[in-house]
Amino acid sequence: MYTRCAYFGINKRDFGEWAEKFILAAEQDKIKRLQPKALIPLLTLSGWEGLDNCIVNQFFAFLEQHAPHVVKDIGYLREISDMRFPHEWGVGARNMQRRIIMHVGPTNSGKTFHALQRLKAAKQGIYCSPLRLLAYEIYNRMTKMGISCGLITGEDRRMPDFATAGVKPIGFNIDSRPLTQLVSCTIEMAPNSAYDVAVIDEIQMLSDLHRGWAWTTALMGLRAKEIHLCGEPSAVPLVKRICESMDEEVEVREYTRLGKLKVSGVSLDGDLGNVRKGDCVVVFSRKEIYEIKKAIEEKTGMRCAVIYGGLPPESRAEQARLFNDPDSGYDVLVASDAVGMGINLSINRVVFMTLQKFDGTGTKLISVSQTRQIGGRAGRFDQGTKVGTVATFKDEDLQQLKKSMEQQPPKLAMAGIKPNLGMIEMFSHQFPNTSFAQLWCMFRDISNVDNDYFLCSFDDQEDIARIIEDLPLSISDRYHFLYAPVSIRDTRMEICLRQFAKAVANRRECRVADVIKLPSSVPNNREGIRDLENWHRAITLYLWLSYHFSESFRQSEDAYVLKDKCEAMIQKGLMSIRHLKGRERGEDMDRYEETVQDRNNDAKERMMNNFLAHLQKTAQAQA
């Protein structure tokens, strides 16, 4: 904690003196944000790291009130990083009277269908999707209906397909360009235009630790006369509080599931030979997906399609098509939690291999919300005509599954936000000799955030900032790179990111063929598939950058050709993949490291659960 405070010029003596006073105030429940009632949702959302960040942040708030002399210009620093009133940022939306309608209910309840019916009838409208795959689906669906619909995702821009019969523009602008009726986009890419109707899907994602800011920004900033929010009932109280701060009322429409859903009375008894046609077997480890696929195919003779988050959206869509097609020969689906939203699937039964998942810091039970959303995929494809079944692989998980499926997800407590470019630029002027990665953390530590909001995780941004730190980039350029669609867990992505950033820094063109080197042959093992997935991410990043730094990334057409080739190779690889006999090289060590990590994570989870239980008892006693 002292190291983080020292960045602001606090000496050890002052830190020691005021840290003691701060601890005493916290023990006496004088620090509102550190009271048990406030800490419970924070810990549930972001764990120990969130608690650490909150303590540092509240220490600076304490200093501003009781010892402003300890940090130079602390009042001004807190003022320029003040994020307590995010609703004031959407000036255009505040100047109009908006109607907010929430469509809430479980999976397969028709909530999104009703919102889309209203969107189709709008003169001009927008659909905000949580996934690229879903944005594509709505774009294609509207086009087939003869509605002029554009597509905007991070790496793709498409005008309506006016060659399709019946698709016509609704007019032309002053440059004689056609005007479209609708836009389907990923939520991060929502254009700042005026609309009659907007649909924001999966509104409960506004509490997502990493991407929640995009839903909060859309809810507060979309300039639409009518906004339809689709999602879980757990989001209703939080959305109402946010809308109340904007002097807007919320109309809630509740829906019930169209078809029946039941929890199986028996598990698969630990035997993959009990998997049957129409099953979706859910696995939370990508490494295990192929192992489970192989075991099912060997034990049952049925072929398995696979869907997981690392696959490109186009590959996921093709795997879904194979599984849905009764004549394709693919009778079983093995999938990660990526199956929880965005794809229509003809699933008869969802089978959880386990109910625990590694979340980046520890292995935890998946939430009630996740369990219900994934389990609810069973029996949903034919508009509720099927009875869906949810089961577990092992007997010991069955009781927990029943409990989670019967419970309602807890009410959401906070919405994610992020600092805008203007805030970061102003903050950086106060620390001209500070690295951007460090500056990013300092902003988080001293910023002022209201109780209904939290700053989305800065972890990925910190990593990206460090990788491009030594390059001569402007604050604006660095900020844009921080929110590029890139995960740098893989060394190749880190290398590609630096090459792309160098091109921007040196004001030169980046040729896609100089960076992207696809293998010459289709892979037949999971490592080869993973390699192609990383190349696909690099191509996607190039395309995203082509819309933000067009002078350096001019070869978008060539990139699209490579993207299509990469997707075709992945699809062929998935269809022909074979497993090496025994374990792949290095797998014994991987399993040993995973065992050690699991033990550490179990200990951390027990500590967290015990601490949360203590906080809940304390909060109840105080109430």
Image (cartoon, grey):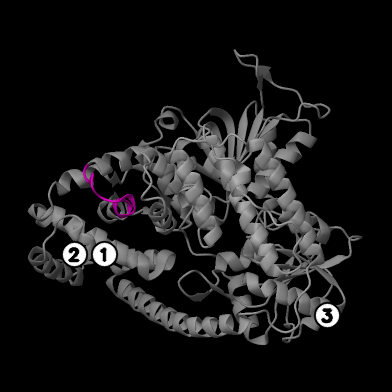
Q: Evaluate if marks 1 and 2 touch, with contact meaning CB atoms under 8 Å apart.
A: no
In the image, farthest residue toward the right: 327
At mark 1, the secondary structure is: helix
What residue is pinned by disc 2? 30
Residue 145 highlighted magenta (yes or no): no
- Where residue 426 appears, as percent x and y from the top left, is 27, 39
Label 2 packing within 10 angstroms: few (<14), some (14-19), many (20+): few
Query: Image point 32% across, 43% down: which residue?
Result: 424
Task: Name the amino acid type tagged 1.
Answer: Ile
SS at mark 2?
loop
Range covered by the magenta-colored residues: 430-440
Q: Residue at x 7, y 52 (%)?
A: 69
Residue 620 is left or right of residue 194, and the answer is: left
Relative to 431, residue 39 above or below: below
Residue 555: x percent and y percent?
62, 36
Locate residue 308, reporting x and y percent: 66, 63
499 left or right, relative to 246: right
Determine the residue positioned at 77% across, 62% down: 573
Say few, some or many: other residues with alpha carbon within 10 Å of mark 3 (under 14 / 14 to 19 / 20 or more): few
Image height check: is 404 above or below 180?
A: below
Element type at marker 3?
helix
* Quadrant into which the C terminus falls: bottom left
Of the pair 131 and 438, the residue shown nearer to us: 438
**Residue at the spot of label 3:** 298
Say which residue label 1 marks.
55
Q: Give the amino acid type for the residue marked by disc 2 in the picture.
A: Lys
What amino acid is labelled 3 in the image?
Answer: Glu
